[in-house]
Amino acid sequence: MRHSLTYLYVHIVWSTWRRAPLITRELQPHIYGAIQHQASKLRCEVIAIGGIEDHVHVLPRYPPTVAISDLVRHMKGASSHLVTHVLGHRNAFKWQGAYGAFSLSKRGLPYVREYVLNQEAHHRDGTLSRALEADSM
């Protein structure tokens, strides 16, 4: 039997509705857990998740059978549903419809992983990478 071997990586960024600061310290682990869970259900390996109160970065390795748009739709939908319906968060929680997705090579993985995991420091210290932030969302 032949097996395909693929190393497909994408850096995905999306924001809360109107960039509202909805991702609190209390909600963050729940949101990241829901994102991780949905990615795993689609056979994606999440390498890193990070962000601040108004946006999230996800760095997964994904199989060629998964469309990036489907992956994002499932991750956003599950996390929004969790916050609104399961946790019963009083404030409306909603993601913006847009997202940014940037492919990268295996060689670029350490840099992007480190960038995603250190979002708070990058925003605090002004060491943002315009290429990795997708400010237009």
Image (spheres, rainbow, N blue to C red):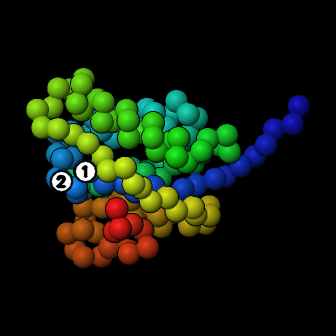
Residue plotted at (81% across, 38% down): 3
Q: Residues within 10 Å of mark 2 (few under 14, many from 20)?
A: some
Q: Is residue 92 visible?
A: yes
Residue furthest to the left? 90
Q: Is residue 35 visible?
A: no
Q: Amino acid at mark 2?
A: Ala
Residue that numbered label 2 is attached to: 20
Query: Going by the image, does 79 lie left or right of 106?
Result: left
Front in this rendered view, residue 97 or 118:
97
Query: Going by the image, does 65 lie left or right of 47?
Result: right
Q: Residues within 10 Å of mark 1 (few under 14, many from 20)?
A: some
Residue 29 drawn at (x, y percent): 27, 39
Q: Amino acid at mark 1?
A: Trp
Residue 124 drawn at (x, y percent): 20, 69
Residue 121 drawn at (x, y percent): 25, 66
Q: Quadrant of the C terminus?
A: bottom left
Q: Secondary structure at mark 1?
A: helix
Residue that numbered label 1 is attached to: 17
Residue plotted at (39% across, 66% down): 134
Quarter residue 136 falls in:
bottom left
Front in this rendered view, residue 136 or 65:
136
Answer above or below: position of 97 versus 106.
Answer: above
Front in this rendered view, residue 25 or 91:
91
Residue furthest to the top? 86
Answer above or below: position of 81 versus 28.
Answer: above
Q: Which mark, residue 41? A: none
Q: Are marks 1 and 2 in contact (CB under 8 Å)?
A: yes
Give the number of callouts.
2
Q: Alpha-carbon distance for marks 1 and 2?
A: 6 Å
Residue plotted at (38% across, 41% down): 76
